[in-house]
Amino acid sequence: MQKVECKIKALENYKGGLDIDFTLPNKFSLNWFVSFSEGKYESLSKSTKSIKSGTVLNKRVIALLSECEERRKSDNKQSQPKAKEHQNLIKRLREELEITKRERNAQAEENIELRRQLIDTKRKVQIFRAQIRDQNTNRKILSMKNNES
């Protein structure tokens, strides 16, 4: 009886729009109800005296399952437009992602080219400085030779 009451409380919470601690089934049915075993909920037998066909509790469970099924269907209908919106959003975000990737790749290529130019410029500056040092060294040598003579 306690297993049944625990499951009934969970279904009432779902029906009332409260948080639930179980995965929604594809369809609320008596077979699902008795085999439902998740977390604190345990499966039970259809032949359990408390939910045997024709008992008050059986009628209560079947009515509750029917109400939960109606809510599940109405939630699905309400979520379909949202699902379409989400699909459109996902599509738009994927397109933006592709554009961003292309821009990033272009920037990366530009960055590589700029680094190559920087390296070339540094080499030219080093060569130019070496040439200036050589010229200064040659001038010193020439001035020393001129002073000796």
Image: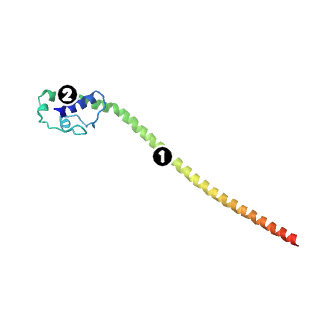
Residue 57 lies, in percent from the top left, at 15, 28
Q: Residues within 10 Å of mark 1 (few under 14, many from 20)?
A: few
The residue where tag 1 is placed is 98
Question: What label does residue 63 carry, if any?
Answer: 2
Is residue 91 placed above or below 146 in the rendered structure?
above
Is residue 17 placed above or below 114 in the rendered structure?
above
Q: Residue furthest bottom?
A: 149
Residue at the spot x=12%, y=35% of the render? 48
56 on left or right of 110: left
Residue type of the residue flagged with mark 2: Ala
Q: Are marks 1 and 2 in contact (CB under 8 Å)?
A: no
Residue 102 lies, in percent from the top left, at 51, 48
Residue type of the residue flagged with mark 1: Glu
Is residue 119 placed above or below 12 in the rendered structure?
below
Residue at the spot x=48%, y=46% of the render? 98
44 on left or right of 93: left
